[in-house]
């Protein structure tokens, strides 16, 4: 097949807010809070560390640790990531280490044990689990990014309350909150969150908002009694800032890499418009006819959760899958369709051919095709000529190259580093093939 040529397009986000010195903003947010009034002198303060790829999270956590120590307290980090990392202590230690979060670099203990204490039951009669290390502290600082969730829409999605109820609930707590699916999530996040704010020593929330470039846009200190009221407003603001695809209808969407370092669901449903959650409709935009993924990221360590959102993939990706973390993650969340492996093609060339042949266009030249490196980095993308009018009519879009042929080598592999040199994949020292030994 003669593939339609592609051109590079850039989204322009010059007007979005951005914090120039996030660690300094973190320090100021702590100093201006009431933390000193809430914790006894010399007390132990637990700071939450999650598994999401928050911009500069190692520097942000280090600033929080240093500031709390300067105020006369004894800080330590506690893993707050539910069942991620395979739901094991070593797995969660490894995830944090990938972000540069280790005891030697942070200068304080990093507690990743999975022990929990049952503090009560929720309205469905299920036990409420809470991290025993955090519970034993004299104060808990909830530090997390607030953003739209990848599975549901509500007043509380990904943020401080989710960190409190699911992150610090460890694997058992995450399973209980997810047990009843979407109805349970929408009901239990605020209910269990309110309960835990009363029963645990939470002394401060530090909310991070990121802009479309995934840079820190705002740092907001939230006193514990204000979390329930404040978080929905911050979520609404975060929704306006997040990066999205600038097209309402796409015939073919090619995603270079899937991984939990890009989204908790591997592919962010808020970007691709597909939810694939039982009983729940897809998002209104964009409408994508054919979606394909080429590779797993190195950072996701074989966890291909989210592959079920795609229609096609490569045999290379399927050989990269480690079923254990994907199984644990899927069975904990209860959203099983997202783990279904789609049709796999031998090469990228075969995949691209199949996409163009099945995207409901008579001619491949008519296809509205978009190629992105992942669902997190959306500033640069490649499009076919059928999207030219959409680009030219949108003041936030600009062509950065002429239309050109696809960089496909003799083995049928697309050169993603050439197309996206500044992406996560493009910045890696070695060009991974993601093959498993």
Image (tube, rainbow, N blue to C red):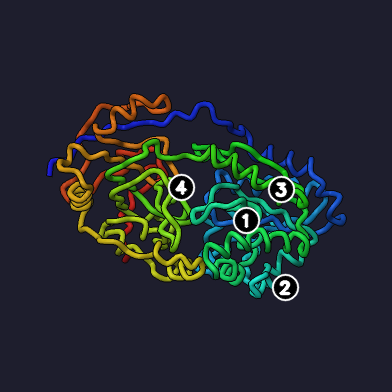
Q: Nearer the viewer, mark 4 or mark 1?
A: 4
Secondary structure beneath dot 2 equals strand
Q: Residue at x 60, y 47 (%)?
A: 146
Q: Nearer the viewer, residue 354 or 55?
A: 354
Q: Give the alpha-carbon distance from disc 2 to disc 4, as whole Å.
A: 34 Å
Q: Nearer the viewer, mark 3 or mark 1?
A: 3
Q: Which mark is residue 430?
A: none
Q: Residue at x 76, y 48 (%)?
A: 223
Q: Give the alpha-carbon distance from disc 2 to disc 1, as whole Å.
A: 24 Å
Give percent across and percent down for residue 31.
78, 42
Q: Which residue is mark 1?
A: 49
Q: Give the alpha-carbon distance from disc 3 to disc 2, as whole Å.
A: 23 Å
Q: Nearer the viewer, residue 320 or 294?
A: 294
Q: Which residue is mark 4?
A: 270
Q: Which residue is mark 3?
A: 229
Q: Give the alpha-carbon distance from disc 4 to disc 3, as whole Å.
A: 24 Å
Give percent across and percent down for residue 287.
35, 45
Secondary structure beneath dot 3 equals helix
Q: Which mark is residue 120?
A: 2
Question: Position of 22 compared to 95: left or right?
Answer: right
Q: Is mark 3 in CB contact (under 8 Å) with mark 2?
A: no
Sequence-wise, which precedes: disc 2 or disc 4?
A: 2
């Amino acid at each position: 097949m003669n593939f339609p040529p592609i051109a590079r397009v850039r989204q322009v986000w010059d007007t979005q807010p951005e914090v120039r010195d996030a660690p300094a903003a973190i320090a100021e947010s702590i100093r201006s809070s009431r933390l000193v009034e809430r914790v006894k002198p010399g007390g132990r303060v637990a700071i939450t560390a999650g598994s999401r790829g928050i911009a500069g999270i190692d520097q942000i956590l280090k600033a929080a640790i240093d500031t709390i120590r300067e105020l006369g307290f004894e800080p330590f980090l506690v893993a707050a990531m539910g069942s991620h990392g395979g739901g094991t202590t070593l797995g969660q230690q490894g995830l944090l280490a990938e972000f540069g979060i280790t005891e030697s670099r942070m200068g304080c203990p990093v507690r990743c044990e999975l022990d929990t204490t049952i503090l009560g039951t929720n309205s469905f009669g299920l036990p409420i689990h809470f991290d025993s290390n955090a519970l034993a502290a004299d104060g808990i600082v909830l530090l997390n990014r607030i953003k739209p969730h990848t599975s549901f829409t509500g007043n509380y999605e990904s943020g401080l309350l989710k960190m409190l109820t699911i992150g610090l609930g460890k694997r058992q707590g995450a399973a209980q909150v997810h047990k009843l699916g979407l109805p349970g999530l929408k009901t239990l996040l605020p209910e269990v969150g309110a309960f835990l704010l009363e029963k645990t020593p939470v002394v401060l929330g530090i909310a991070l908002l990121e802009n479309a470039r995934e840079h820190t846009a705002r740092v907001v200190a939230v006193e514990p009694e204000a979390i329930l009221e404040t978080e929905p407003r911050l979520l609404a603001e975060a929704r306006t800032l997040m990066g999205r695809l600038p097209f309402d209808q796409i015939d073919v969407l090619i995603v270079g890499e899937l991984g939990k370092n890009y989204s908790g669901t591997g592919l962010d449903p808020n970007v691709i418009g597909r939810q694939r959650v039982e009983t729940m409709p897809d998002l209104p935009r964009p409408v994508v006819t054919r979606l394909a993924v080429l590779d797993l990221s190195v950072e996701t360590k074989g966890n291909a959760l989210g592959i079920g959102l795609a229609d096609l993939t490569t045999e290379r990706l399927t050989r990269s899958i480690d079923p254990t973390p994907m199984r644990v993650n899927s069975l904990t969340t209860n959203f099983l369709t997202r783990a279904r492996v789609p049709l796999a093609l031998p090469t990228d060339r075969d995949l691209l051919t199949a996409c163009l042949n099945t995207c409901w266009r008579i001619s491949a030249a008519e296809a509205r095709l978009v190629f992105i490196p992942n669902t997190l980095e959306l500033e640069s993308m490649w499009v076919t000529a059928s999207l030219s009018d959409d680009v030219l009519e949108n003041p936030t879009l600009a062509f950065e190259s002429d239309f050109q042929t696809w960089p496909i080598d003799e083995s049928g592999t697309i050169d993603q580093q050439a197309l996206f040199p500044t992406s996560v994949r493009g910045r890696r020292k070695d060009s991974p093939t993601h093959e498993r030994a």
